[in-house]
Image (spheres, rainbow, N blue to C red):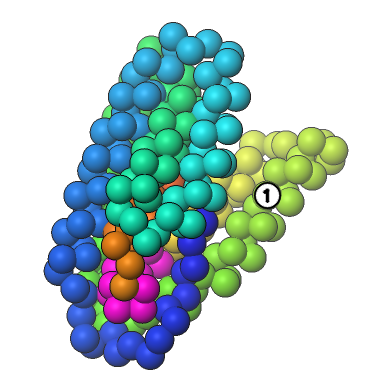
Amino acid sequence: MSNRSPSVAYRVSDGVRGSLMGRTLGFLALLLLILAAAGFVSPLAGKAGMWVGIAAALVGTILVGRNMASARRAFFWGAVVAIGMGLLVGPVVWSVALTQGPLLWSTLGILLVAVLFAASLVSWIPWDFSRLAPLLFVGLLMLMATALLSWIVPGLTGIAMSRAYNLIGTLIFIGYLIVDFSLMRVRGRAVPMEGAAVVLAVSIMIDIVNLFLFLLRLGRR
């Protein structure tokens, strides 16, 4: 979705640019509100909502990075991503809320702790965690390959394998959260574009949604 590697030399000890952090968190809050609104009305969209959500999430993810030069254009496509993901995740949230309410709240609580942990780790340790991105990407590819193989190999669909799969997915997206929070320390200097905060906010939103889904599946009995 976006280039996760800084393009210029940067000392992590320089710290985070406050304006970038503030804009990123502000855009993230707006995008999460849009996502929540789309998820709230997702049952009204029916089965068509799933396909609209997939198309919106894919197209928006591609175009938000290509419009980084303008915060307005980037935010428009970021909102498209948020709407798409809301339409996709909404039915899952509604289903769990109606049948396993305590699981939903406990998952949200764990999600909040994970986000705070990632942010705290980056603030405490002056190291460029974006260097972990290639390793996480390899792990994500292996996870996707395992999901595809599970349709073919019956042995990959057992309870133990399912828990291991969801645990690894959880760890991968906690890692991506750490990477994206770390990029707040370098993005304003490495890519000084108006829409950089929006692109970073979209990346964090995607991390949060995927982490939520893996945690939800991990908590199911």
**Is residue 203 among what the camera can see?**
no
On screen, residue 74 versus residue 139, left or right, reads left
Percent position of residue 85, x then y: 46, 34
**Is residue 18 among what the camera can see?**
yes
Quadrant housing residue 14: bottom left
Q: Is residue 187 above or below residue 147?
A: below
Residue at 53% over, 19% down:
49
Residue at 42% over, 78% down:
6
Residue at 35% over, 32% down:
35
For residue 190: magenta? yes
Residue that carries the numbered disc 1 in the rendered image:
144
Q: Is residue 9 above or below residue 153?
A: below
| SS state under label 1 | helix
Q: Is residue 113 above or below residue 3?
A: above
Q: Which secondary structure class fits the magenta region best?
A: helix
User: Please, what is the three-letter code of the amino acid marked with disc 1?
Assistant: Met
Residue at 79% over, 36% down:
151
Percent position of residue 124, x then y: 22, 75
Percent position of residue 218, x then y: 49, 39
Q: Nearer the viewer, residue 8 or 164?
A: 8
Q: Which residues are magenta?
A: 177-191
Q: Is residue 30 above or below residue 171?
A: above
On screen, residue 113 versus residue 164, left or right, reads left
Tell me if mark 1 has few (under 14), some (14-19) or many (20+) residues whose alpha carbon lies within 10 angstroms of its own: some
Percent position of residue 54, x then y: 57, 32
Quadrant housing residue 197: bottom left
Q: Nearer the viewer, residue 77 or 114?
A: 77
